Image: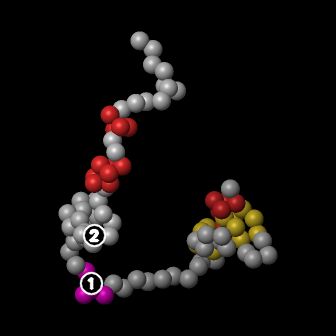
């Protein structure tokens, strides 16, 4: 049997009254909060535990002679990735694409 997809579809929900629909929709002004929200866990902990009391030392090296900083994405890249130079500075291949 062929199905006409352009024809309007009639269901039992079409005859439902506005009052019945309002009863099913939760009241936004009620102030109740869904505590068991599985999509947004409030107490998410990483497997490694709490690292807040530890100081992490990171060594930051300045840009080397064969590197440049792209003026579009501000990433430090190797000179072989320069696409072109502007009056502001070099643009990398990825930003020029």
- Nearer the observer, 52 or 63: 52
Q: What quarter of the picture does the C terminus occupy? A: bottom right
> What's the residue at 75%, 77% (across, down)?
88
Query: Would residue 26 appear left or right of 89 to someone viewing this image?
Result: left
Vertical arrangement, residue 10 with respect to residue 29, above or below? above
The residue sitting at 40% across, 30% down in the picture is 10
Taking depth in this image into account, of 25 and 40 the one nearest to the observer is 25
Q: Could you tell me residue 7's position as x and y percent?
A: 50, 26
Q: Which residues are magenta?
A: 51-55
Q: Look at 59% across and 78% down and name the residue there.
A: 64
Residue with the mark numbered 2: 30
Q: Quadrant of residue 16?
A: top left
Name the quadrant containing residue 83: bottom right
Position of residue 94 in the picture relative to residue 48 (left or right) = right
Nearest the eye: 84 or 41: 41
Residue 53 falls in which quadrant of the image? bottom left
Residue depicted at 66% across the width and 70% down the height: 72
Whichever of labels 2 and 1 marks the residue nearer the N terminus, that label is 2
The front one of 73 and 93 is 73
The residue tagged with tag 2: helix, strand or loop?
Answer: loop
The answer to whether residue 18 is seen in the rendering is yes
Graded by Cα atoms within 10 Å as few (under 14), some (14 to 19) or many (20 or more), the crowding at tag 2 reads few
Badge count: 2
Measured as percent of width and height from the top left, residue 86 is found at 78, 71
The x, y position of residue 42, in whole percent, is 25, 70
Magenta region, mostly helix, strand or loop? loop
Q: Is residue 20 above or below residue 36?
A: above
- Name the mark on residue 52: 1
């Amino acid at each position: 049997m062929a199905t006409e997809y352009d024809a309007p579809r009639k269901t039992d929900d079409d005859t439902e009254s506005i009052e019945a629909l309002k009863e099913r929709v939760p009241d936004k002004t009620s102030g109740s909060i869904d505590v068991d929200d599985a999509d947004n866990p409030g107490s998410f902990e990483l497997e490694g535990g709490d690292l807040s009391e530890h100081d992490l030392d990171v060594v930051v090296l300045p840009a080397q002679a064969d590197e440049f900083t792209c003026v579009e994405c501000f990433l430090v890249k190797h000179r072989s990735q320069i696409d072109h130079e502007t009056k502001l500075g070099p643009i990398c291949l990825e930003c020029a694409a």
